Amino acid sequence: MTDTRRYRRAYVVGAYLPNGGTRMAYALGCILERDFGIPAVAVQIAGEAPLHGIHACDLRMPQIGLAQMEAEIGDDDILIANPSFSPHQFGLRLPGFKLCYVQGFNTFGLLDQRFQHYVAASDFVCGFLRDVYGLHARTIAPYIELEALPPAMAWEDRPPLRLLPYRKGLPEVWDASFARLREIVGRRAPEIEFAEPLAGGALPQKELFAHMAEVRYLLTLSAAEGFGLVPLEAMALGTLVVGYDGYGGRHYMQPGENCLVAPYPQIERIADMLVAVVNDPAGGATLAANGRHTAQAYSFAAFRSAWCEELSRSLGIEPVAN
């Protein structure tokens, strides 16, 4: 067994930034500290990182600035950074074991390719890394906080014609797609009600869950996602996901089986599916139930187990006894 003391600290870049990607980086810091005994440190990129943003954080990592991290990191440290931080060129400039959890393909212009290890968040991202950069990465899907989900209303008790749009992604793409969808639906099924769109990253997670648990349909028009946590969370709440698959969402989305999605820019097809399912509530209930079943596989326990195995292999260390 390799001595875990060979690694002094694990620096997690942007650990407290309020988005799903950095939330997964924060979780890796928690696993390294709690399962491997390597203290985790949160690295702030810009401004003050809130301890309580859209996510609840039970591990309070010490927080330092980027300049301090760069001044003190050494060969016996670990650096965890998402690919969106590629412009910093950590791979070329800094010592230590550098790990990149690649959760997207459109959050960076050019990937920093000088990290020691890469892991992909979805099969689509895995293929992207292979085809574009020649990197062969294992896929470990993100998790959703199943234990934090509120009680969801029964399908038959939810408003039958109400659709909740979730606003995330390129604004110009979202706006044009939403306008086109409303135009088609307004002609063919004017009885469908569009709720006020929820803005991604604007609500604490509990509030977002509460909104999704009260509607039958979540509309997602984010055209490009490395994975897509919110649609999977909606599935876990028994809400039927309608919209773009985001490409990375194909990891868990099965159109016509557990959701009703299509690739960007097939908004007319999405409108067809929406109108059809509103007129077939029993079919919609079946799809939503299937989605709920799918989501159960994406637990923190599964994420932790996969990452413990991956970190043991890539770092040459073993978890410490709890």
Image: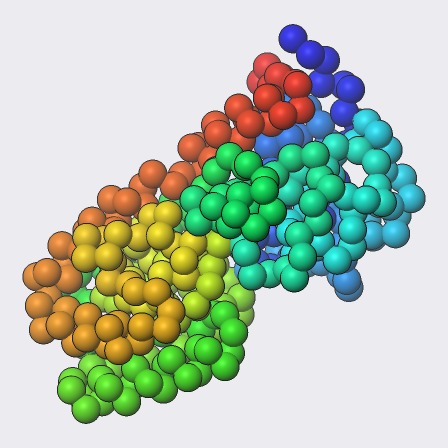
For residue 115, which quarter of the picture? top right
Q: Nearer the viewer, residue 56 or 111?
A: 111
Q: Which residue is drawn at 83% across and 52% down?
A: 65
Residue 125 location in percent, x, y? 49, 49
Residue 189 location in percent, x, y? 16, 85
Above or below, 173 relative to 131: below
Q: Is residue 126 left or right of residue 246?
A: right
Whether residue 22 is visible to the viewer of this picture, yes or no, is yes
Q: Residue at x 38, y 69 (%)?
A: 264
Q: Which of 56 and 272 is in front in this view?
A: 272
Quadrant housing the C terminus: top right
Q: Which residue is drawn at 38% across and 54% down?
A: 249
Q: Which residue is drawn at 41% across and 84% down?
A: 176
Residue 270 location in percent, x, y? 26, 72
Above or below, 6 relative to 280: above
Q: Residue furthest right?
A: 71
Whether residue 206 is visible to the viewer of this picture, yes or no, is no
Colour logic: rainbow
- The number of discs equals 0
Q: In this view, does 185 lie to the left or right of 227?
A: left
Residue 274 location in percent, x, y? 21, 73
Q: Residue furthest top?
A: 1
Q: Which of 94 and 74 is in front in this view?
A: 94
Quadrant housing the N terminus: top right
